[in-house]
Every structure is written in C-alpha cells, then in structure tokens.
Image (spheres, helix red, strand yellow):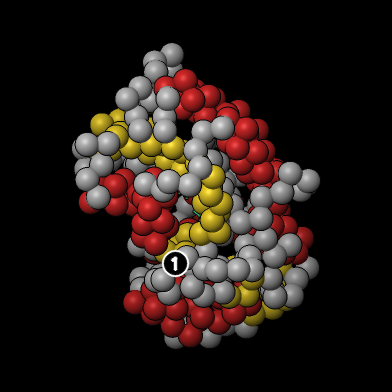
C-alpha cells in the first residue's frame, strides 16, 4: 500500500483529499498545525508540519499533497499571527524535507494566475513557490484553483458570507463594476483531481483547477439572491469604500471578512482563466440544493484558526 502525506487533513480541502485517498486505497498520513485543536474523526495518523520539528516527518512517504497556505497576513489581537512571507518560508522547508525524504511526487496547491511581478503577496508568493518546486526537480503537479465551494455552506467561506450579507444587509455591493469573474470548483472535484495527479506519470504538470461555471462577482450576487428568494439592490461602489464596509462587518463578526489585497485580486480578474475546465459539479446546482442553509451563520476565517 502506498503512503500519501496530506497537509490540512483536519482542515478544508485536505480533508476531502484524504477521504478520496482512503477510498482509492492509499495509507494516509496527515500533516497539521492543529493536532489536538481540531477534531480527527477519521483517526488519521497525524504528524507535525516539517518546518516545525526536527523529525523526518516525510520518511516513508510516496506522495505529498500540499494544501498549506495562509489566506492573508494577520497580526491582530486574539489569534496567533501569520503571514504570507512565513507561509512561503515554511513551504520551501516542506519541499526541502520532501526532497530529503525521497518523496516521488508532490501535488501542490497554488492559485489561478500566480504572478511573480504582482504587488499582491498572495499571487506573488504562490508564483515563488511554483518556481521553487520546479527547481527541486521533483516530479510534481501544480493545481491552480480559483475558489473552492462545498460540501457544506460553512466551509465555503466567501460564498457563504455573500449569502449571509444578502440575509442580513439592506443592500449589497460590488467593488467597482463587479464584472470581474470567478470560476469556483467543488471541493470534491478538487479532491478527485488531486488524487488523479498523485498517480500521474508526467514529470511536470500545471492544471487550472477551475469549475464548470464562470460568474462575474455581480452575477454571483444574483445567483445567490435568486436561489435564496431574497432580493437586495446590488450597488457598484468604489473598491476602497466597499473595503471599509467589510472592515466594519469584520469588526462586528470578530473576523477579517475580506482584505484590500483580496478585493484587488478579484478586481484584477485573477480568479478566472481561459482554457479547459476541470470540475463537473455545478455551483448553480449546489447553491440551489443549499439555499435554505446558505448564509444562516457567518463563516469566520479567524474562528477557524482558533
Ligand atoms: N479555499 C479556497 O476557496 C481557495 C481558493 C483558491 C486557492 N486555494 C488554495 O487551496 C489551498 C487549500 O485551501 P483550504 O481553504 O483548503 O485551506 P485550509 O484547510 O484552511 O488550510 C490548509 C492548510 O494550511 C494551514 N493553514 C491555513 N491557514 C493557516 C494559518 N493562518 N496559519 C497556519 N496554518 C494555516 C492549515 O493548517 P492546520 O493544519 O492547522 O489545519 C492546513 O494545514 C491553499 O493553498 C489555498 O491557497 C483555496
């Protein structure tokens, strides 16, 4: 039986990849920051992240699936600080540990349109990591999702919180025109792709892990509102004004709802790409199925971090 190490098996996408790996007969080892903090109902064997220990946690591992990253940099009160710079450093240490351990393939999660020249640390950091992985010479697949959704509303933070805004606010907004697009992929489609790639033969693959449907930000509001039967005016507002509004909502919910950089990434149309799509599960079907639950509760990124 081959062994696969997966980061974030107690988190979001990593949990679905791990379940898919088990279905396909792999032995799963979970790499996590959160042993003891998050529940482990599947009873996965857990090991610490490679950079946080002197142990050779990737010994005996055939394939590494990496989902580790941080959504934004944070140094506020009440939660441990984290940053993109630290995530880049830690991921480089993980690649080095994989190389030392003789891991035969790395499946690495990136983002649509990573960009070494971007002023946005998310897209710049992801480009740096892709280049570093290529430079290791290890066989690898790089998966570039735009946004993940499913299986439950609470896990689909951006989409759930758009639905929450529709339920709780008298009007909603687009940052600027709202014509910029996104191609969400269902987390199970992503997990199946990751496990297909764990078995791939090609030495070097890059795949845009995007779903079957493309929505502009404006149309995303309409899709959700229609499914939920909740009409609200959608106002185009200057991006900075929209950001300040999300800051107020963040203060009320004890979260960071969206960052300036995330709004810039959206506005730069970075979450859509030309070419073939991968996901087959349709966002519109999922929204319809979950309309009654979507947005009932705010999904907090910071609360998820503990
Ligand atoms: N979710 C999306 O919509 C989306 C969209 C585009 C790209 N992606 C990419 O997909 C990958 C997985 O995303 P996900 O939403 O499934 O991530 P996740 O489950 O929240 O986290 C994945 C891993 O990163 C660690 N991590 C996350 N935030 C952290 C923080 N603030 N400090 C320390 N460790 C942290 C988690 O740690 P623990 O071990 O403690 O759980 C886990 O090991 C990422 O590379 C992300 O860039 C996601």
Identify the residue shown where x is 26% and y is 31%: 45
* Residue 233 picture location, percent across and down: 62, 83
On whether ligand 1 comes within 8 Å of the CB at mark 1, the answer is no
* Residue 64 picture location, percent across and down: 41, 36
* Residue 25 picture location, percent across and down: 22, 45
Q: Within the image, what quadrant is residue 198 found in?
A: top left
For the C terminus, which image quadrant? top left
Identify the residue shown where x is 38% and y is 36%: 63
Image check: 247 left or right of 229? right
Counting every numbered tag in the picture gives 1
Q: Within the image, what quadrant is residue 105 found in?
A: top left
Binning the other alpha carbons within 10 Å of mark 1 as few (below 14), some (14 to 19) or many (20 upward) gives many
Viewer-nearest residue: 59 or 245 = 59
For the N terminus, which image quadrant? top left
Image check: 152 left or right of 255? left
Identify the residue shown where x is 38% and y is 25%: 58
Residue 195 showing in the rendered view = yes
Image check: 140 left or right of 18? right
Secondary structure at badge 1 equals loop
Residue ID for mark 1: 279
* 99 in relation to 38, above or below: above
* 10 in relation to 248, above or below: above
* 239 in relation to 35, above or below: below
Q: Residue furthest top?
A: 54
* Residue 91 picture location, percent across and down: 55, 32
Residue 32 showing in the rendered view = no
Identify the residue shown where x is 78% and y is 68%: 238
């Amino acid at each position: 039986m081959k062994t696969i190490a997966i980061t974030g098996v107690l988190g979001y996408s990593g949990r679905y990849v791990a379940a898919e790996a088990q279905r396909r007969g792999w032995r799963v080892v979970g790499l996590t920051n959160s042993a003891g903090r998050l529940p482990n109902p599947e009873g996965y064997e857990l090991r610490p992240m490679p950079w946080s220990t002197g142990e050779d946690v990737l010994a005996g591992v055939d394939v590494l699936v990496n989902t580790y990253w941080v959504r934004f940099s944070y140094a506020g009160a009440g939660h441990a600080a984290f940053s993109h710079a630290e995530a880049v450093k830690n991921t480089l240490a993980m690649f080095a540990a994989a190389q030392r351990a003789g891991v035969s393939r790395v499946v690495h999660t990136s983002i649509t349109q990573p960009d070494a020249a971007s002023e946005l640390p998310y897209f710049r950091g992801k480009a740096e990591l892709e280049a570093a992985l290529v430079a290791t010479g290890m066989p690898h697949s790089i998966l570039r999702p735009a946004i993940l959704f499913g299986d439950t509303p609470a896990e689909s933070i951006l989409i759930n919180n758009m639905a929450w805004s529709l339920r709780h606010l008298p009007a909603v907004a687009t940052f600027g025109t709202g014509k910029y697009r996104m191609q969400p992929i269902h987390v199970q489609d992503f997990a199946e792709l990751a496990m297909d790639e764990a078995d791939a033969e090609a030495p070097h693959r890059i795949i845009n892990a995007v779903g079957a449907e493309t929505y502009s930000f404006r149309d995303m509001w309409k899709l959700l509102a229609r499914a939920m039967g909740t009409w609200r005016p959608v106002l185009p507002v200057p991006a900075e004004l929209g950001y300040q509004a999300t800051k107020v909502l963040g203060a009320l919910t004890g979260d960071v709802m969206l960052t300036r950089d995330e709004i810039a990434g959206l506005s730069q149309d970075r979450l859509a790409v030309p070419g073939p799509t991968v996901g087959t599960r349709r966002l519109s079907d999922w929204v319809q199925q979950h309309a009654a639950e979507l947005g009932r509760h705010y999904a907090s990124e910071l609360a998820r971090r503990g």
